[in-house]
Image (tube, rainbow, N blue to C red):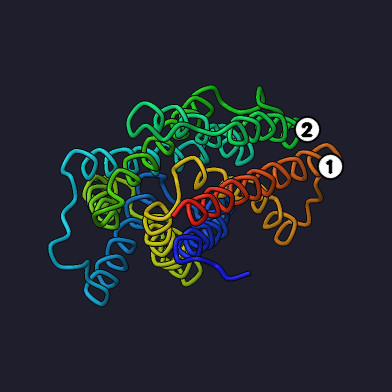
Amino acid sequence: MSVSQPQKQQMAGQAAVLVTAFLWSTSGLLIKLLPWNPMVITGLRSFFAAVFILIVRLIVPPPKGTKNPPLPLIAGAIAYVLTMYTFVIANKLTTAANAIMLQYSAPAWAALLGWLLIREKPHWEHWGALALIAGGLFLFFTDSSGLGAGALTGDALALFSGVTLGANSVFLRMQKEGNPRDSMLLAHAISAVISVPFIFLYPPSLSVPSVLTILYMGFFQIGLASVLFAYGLTKISAVQAMLIAILEAILNPIWVLAINGEKPTPRALAGGLIIIGAVVASSLIGKRREDLAAAKGIAGS
């Protein structure tokens, strides 16, 4: 069976967000390992990310005549700045597991905001996946270091980062006819400027490992990820993007296992399988619906 052009574009968008999740998943461990002030980490990471996105923009410029609606452009940038700072600070104040669990309330916020702002009403499989994801994350992280073990401030910031990440995905989706990369470029530029006084207040201790770490985080972990995430949201809905990106929450413990030798508990493993199953099932059901709709369209023409 041949694949239509819209289906190819959707698959490309899904693949872009999947790679984004992989890159994002390395952030929690690296933030913990990098002995710098969180404002410095966020700002320097964003500086290199802005350089990367600018280079990509020069190599692959947006189509002539492409314009971004000003409000989503600025709102998306501000939402992402808030996401980056609150998540990095939360990782320093509470456990990485707590931070990512709370941030990944984002799909729920993306569903609600997408419905309100751009009339992308979630289908039943999206709501079902969100319910399963919530249950899976609860199982995944309710071990000996449960939610109450983290600092209240860090947990609150992590939850807020979930709200702003969901909002960012919707604002990027609102720029699907424009160039949402510019929103991410603006976000990283703002973030870099904000960090300048903190770099002088808390000068980072430079070493080969720390420099290589921040370069990787800037160019790849957040820079390339920003480009791919912005591209993905021109091809798929904000809810679908967030459901795929939730795989970051599964990949994080794999990095911990590889670096620190920590094995997931049976409860955490069960939660991970529920999340993966929910994302896969939601994507397959959505694809099936689109196939049926396309078939009806062809039959009716």
Image position, residue 270 (x, y; %): 82, 40
Name above or below for residue 300 compared with residue 231.
above
Question: With 176 as the anchor, is 134 left or right in this view?
Answer: right
Crowd class of label 2 (few under 14; some 14 to 19; many from 20; radius 10 Å): some
Query: What amino acid is labelled 2 in the image?
Result: Asp
Query: What amino acid is labelled 1 in the image?
Result: Thr
Image position, residue 232 (x, y; %): 43, 56
Observer-nearest of 179 and 136 = 179
**Pointer 1 residue:** 265
The C terminus appears in which quarter of the rendering?
bottom left
Image position, residue 262 (x, y; %): 78, 51
Question: With 255 as the anchor, is 169 left or right in this view?
Answer: left
**Pointer 2 residue:** 143
Name above or below for residue 195 compared with residue 213.
above
> Spatial distance from mark 2 to mark 1, Cα to Cα?
8 Å
Task: Tell me which corner region of the image, top left, top right, bottom left or bottom right, holds residue 144.
Answer: top right
Q: Which element type, helix, strand or loop, lies under badge 2?
A: loop
Contact check, label 2 and label 1, Cβ < 8 Å:
yes
